[in-house]
């Protein structure tokens, strides 16, 4: 109905009134006679209580009487424009308040397990993201328009972005719940990803420092690979709406346009390096040629790593890779078992492939937690994707 607030419902009109129904208290409701039988009808008691609260609330607020039958807002409140205007002023963003009470309040009905299922991350992490982005990025601050009506809250914007990333939803799939139009959802996603990268990138997307390198070396030495600092591999992300003029450039062995993500990871699935945006026609070796992974070594800056293997001392750490990469001193490849009949070499190949699975396990967890990586990419240009 035009003119009625979309969230104008009697459940939000509350007033402290006695919880009595025909002389019975809430603690002792008593039985209700239904067609000559006495039954406990809890829902009927609660329904009567809600009606009574609403009517008494309206009587005290605007002077409407119970005989005017104001229980159905969609039918009877269309002539009460003054009441609707006062409701809009009193509850300018009722949907957001309802959402916050359901998701983020301490008394929320959703426990930690339910929250993780909805957001694919802990409640504390989501709350910290909301607080950090609200304090540092004006885009996520709730503002009022020229009429004084409050706009989208940070909870709405960040919830929409997280659900799109977690479930791979299209841009217009959150319009009913989070109330973001398609264009707003696209802009919100780009700003959210850019803000996360800018604010949390120095902490979570950084090269390992001396303390990290020492821990990683000790961890991999215990697994039988002294001097190893992680595993290296690439992942392809299908690009459904790739421009026609660039489709051939981005089409590789997957027979569909893709964008490549190169990353290194350790046993704890921590990503220490990522390089995203190269066309899918390139194989892993060609992507590494364009990657800044070894740029510091090319610039003459050593990694400051020293380890012993037998009686020899080495100062160049290495990554574990598959057989497509070049045989560099910084890359230890896995070879086919058919290439050797030596039992010791076969054991080494099996151990190398086992530890090298760290990066593949990281890609699997990443795709499981963020379903958008499993679906075909439907929106965004190459520039915006690289920035995000």
Image: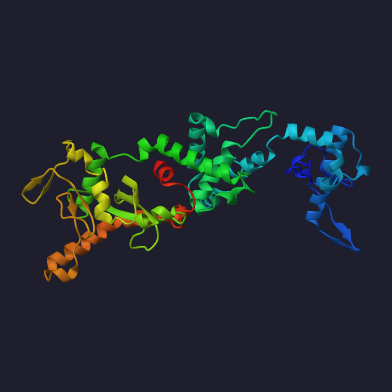
Extreme residue toward the right, this view:
67
Q: Would you place residue 127 above or below residue 265 in this image?
A: above
Tell me: 145 left or right of 194: right
Extreme residue toward the front, this view:
245
Q: How is the image coloured?
A: rainbow
- The quarter of the picture where residue 316 lies is top left
- The quarter of the picture where residue 93 lies is top right
Tell me: 179 left or right of 88: left
Question: For this rendering, which residue is in front, 73 or 219?
Answer: 73
Question: For this rendering, which residue is in front, 53 or 202?
Answer: 202
Q: Is residue 25 visible?
A: no
Q: Residue at x 41, y 43 (%)?
A: 383
The x, y position of residue 226, in whole percent, is 17, 50
Q: Residue at x 31, y 49 (%)?
A: 263
The x, y position of residue 310, in whole percent, is 8, 51
Q: Residue at x 55, y 45 (%)?
A: 160
Q: Quadrant of the C terminus?
A: top left
Tell me: 241 left or right of 85: left
Question: For this rendering, which residue is in front, 338 or 38?
Answer: 338
The x, y position of residue 271, in whole percent, is 33, 46
Q: Residue at x 17, y 62 (%)?
A: 348
Question: For this rendering, which residue is in front, 98 or 150?
Answer: 150
- The quarter of the picture where residue 86 lies is top right
What count of labels does the image hold? 0
Extreme residue toward the left, this view:
311
């Amino acid at each position: 109905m035009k003119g009625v607030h979309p969230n104008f419902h009697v459940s939000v009109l509350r007033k402290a009134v006695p919880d009595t129904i025909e002389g019975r208290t809430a603690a002792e409701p008593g039985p209700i006679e239904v067609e000559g039988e006495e039954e406990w009808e809890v829902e009927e008691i609660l329904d009567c209580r809600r009606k009574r609260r609403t009517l008494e609330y309206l009587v005290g607020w605007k002077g409407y009487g119970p005989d005017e039958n104001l229980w159905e807002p969609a039918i009877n409140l269309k002539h009460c424009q003054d009441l609707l205007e006062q409701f809009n002023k009193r509850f300018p963003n009722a949907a957001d308040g309802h959402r916050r009470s359901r998701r983020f309040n301490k008394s929320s009905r959703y426990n930690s397990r339910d929250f993780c299922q909805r957001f694919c991350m802990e409640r504390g992490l989501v709350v910290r993201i909301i607080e950090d982005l609200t304090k540092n990025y004006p885009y996520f601050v709730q503002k009022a328009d020229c009429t004084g009506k409050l706009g989208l809250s940070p909870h709405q914007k960040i919830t929409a972005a997280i659900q799109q990333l977690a479930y791979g939803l299209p841009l217009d799939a959150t319009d009913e719940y989070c109330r973001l139009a398609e264009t707003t959802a696209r802009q919100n996603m780009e700003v959210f990803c850019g803000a996360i990268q800018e604010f949390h990138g120095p902490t979570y997307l950084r090269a390992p420092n001396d303390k990290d390198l020492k821990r990683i070396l000790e961890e991999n030495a215990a697994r039988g690979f002294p001097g190893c600092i992680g595993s290296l591999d690439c992942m392809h992300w299908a690009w459904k709406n790739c421009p026609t003029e660039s489709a051939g450039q981005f089409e590789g062995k997957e027979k569909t346009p893709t964008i490549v993500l190169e990353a290194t990871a350790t046993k704890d699935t921590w990503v220490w390096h990522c390089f995203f945006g190269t066309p899918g026609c390139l194989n892993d070796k060609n992507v590494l040629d364009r990657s800044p992974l070894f740029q510091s070594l090319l610039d003459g800056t050593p990694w400051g790593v020293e380890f012993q293997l037998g009686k020899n001392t080495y100062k160049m750490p290495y990554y574990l890779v598959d057989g497509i990469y070049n045989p560099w001193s910084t890359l230890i490849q896995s070879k086919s078992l058919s290439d050797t009949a030596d039992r010791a070499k076969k054991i080494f190949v099996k151990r190398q492939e086992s530890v090298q699975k760290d990066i593949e396990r990281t890609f699997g967890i990443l795709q499981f937690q963020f379903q958008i990586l499993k679906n075909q990419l439907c929106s965004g240009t190459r520039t915006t994707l690289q920035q995000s």
